[in-house]
Image (cartoon, rainbow, N blue to C red):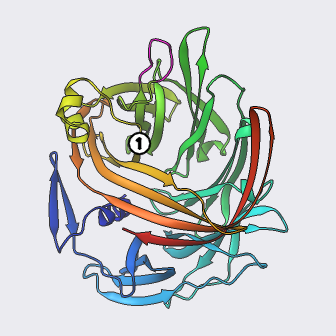
Amino acid sequence: MKKLLFTLLITVISFQAHAQMQVGNVTLDFGSKITAKKGDVTYIAGEKNGTIYTLARQKKMFYVQTFESGSNKFLKSKQIKFDKINGNKVTIEDLAIIDGEVFLFGSYYDKKAKKSVFAAYSIDEKLILGKPKTVLAVEVPKRSQQGAFFFEPSYDGVNYLVMHVGIFERDEKLRYEIALLDKTLAAVHNEAVDLQFKDRKDLEFSLDDFEVNDKGDIFVVVSDSYRNKAKKTTETNLTVHAYYASKGYAKENIDIDLKGKKVLNCNVINTADGRLQLIGFYSNLRKSGRADWRLEGIFDVAVETSDNSVVKETFNEFSVETKTKLIGERRAKKGKDLKPFYRITHLIERENGGVIVLSEWYTTYVGNTSGIGPLAFTPITYSTNEIIVTALNQDGTMDWSNVVPKEQQVTVTQFSIGLAGGMANGSVSVGVGVLFPLAILGEVT
């Protein structure tokens, strides 16, 4: 958790040695700055034997760099150069320390086998990469539906969870596959789950978050919602798939009733008291039963993992003071809610049993594609802005909330070869487009 918080803060504020910031009744101490030998440090994996391992980037080049713990003195730097695997280009995914072993992870699409592959490279003290080892390979229909990989270490750093997610909107289907790895990269557990949703009015479904605790238990959170015209309401189903190591990883479903609220997003944390806490933003429903798609506030649901019982459901509206800092005093006093563009980035357990929630404004803007013939260039702008810091009490009620100003923008240009076709008949038109990304040209502003 310290690594995750530091990674977030290093992107938020440019700071000098031992800078501090007061947010609510919490003091954030940034410590001393890590300066990359080449490029900028973009990610801190953790520490091994007094050495900090990081990822750094300089334009299109990436480096593994090490620093001395405590002094942050630069030690070594090694440019990452992946050889193609069976003719397939490998993309960097993550740098992680698993039970004292350092690994660099990458992914690629196997054209012949039609598989999305997640591979691991061991890293020695000289920063030399070992041979790639496949840790998860998932069959996919085609390149355009190859899905995405998600990953995170367990709280204690002993295990590493890799997840592949594929969403098939036309079939109203979601599929995920997980692999829990130990330091030898052996799978402690594998699981593949297909979720088929019934085609309904305004149907939406998503995989919201996943977690692995220090016992090796795995939790996956999925949600779906639809419009119930008969009852004039929007039904939201929030479900936890629990895999307990002590029960042989047999899948158990935990269903949660959100009592007429619309889930906008949801994140999960397994706290020290053994409870699973689901925290996210919610929207109220209009008289028509439709969601108003405004961020009304934050909810905190707790599940007792000993018996899967739901022991807490708390909904907190954001205060006028917090809204004033985000949308202005006039709109806040009129009861206006926030736009639903905030995402939770971190959940940090408090000493009193509560949770500190960090969330930020996040939007993606895809510009018009331009080019000559089959060559196409598409500008994509990722924007992040202010961070909302919310402190929840143990019972889920809001203790305090504050806003940290921030602004960051990243613009990338996707260079593609496009093949497109279309058909039209009267007022109905159907267009088909296939894009094959060749390169990403990025610039941070």
102 and 84: which is toward the camera: 84
The residue that label 1 is drawn on is: 341
Q: Residue at x 44, y 16 (%)?
A: 286
360 and 47: which is toward the camera: 360
Is residue 345 at all visible to an observer of this figure? no
Q: Residue at x 63, y 82 (%)?
A: 82
Residue lying farthest right? 112
> Is residue 436 one of those drawn in magenta?
no
The quadrant in which the C terminus is found is: bottom left
Relative image position of residue 378 (x, y in whole percent): 57, 62
Q: Secondary structure at mark 1?
A: loop
Q: How many marks?
A: 1
User: Label 1: few (<14), some or many (≥20) within 10 Å?
Assistant: some
Residue lying farthest top? 230
Q: Is residue 272 left or right of residue 82?
A: left
Relative image position of residue 213 (x, y in whole percent): 49, 50
350 and 442: which is toward the camera: 442
Q: Is residue 427 left or right of residue 34?
A: right
Q: Residue at x 75, y 38 (%)?
A: 429
In the figure, 445 relative to 177: above or below? below
Q: Quadrant of residue 419?
A: bottom right
Dominant SS type (magenta): loop
- Bounds of the magenta segment: 284-291
Q: Is residue 53 left or right of residue 335?
A: right
Relative image position of residue 47 (x, y in whole percent): 39, 74
In the figure, 405 relative to 324: above or below? below
Residue lying farthest front? 426
Please, what is the three-letter code of the amino acid marked with disc 1? Phe
Relative image position of residue 85 (x, y in whole percent): 74, 78
In the figure, 163 relative to 234: above or below? below
The quadrant in which the N terminus is found is: bottom left
Q: Quadrant of residue 376?
A: bottom right
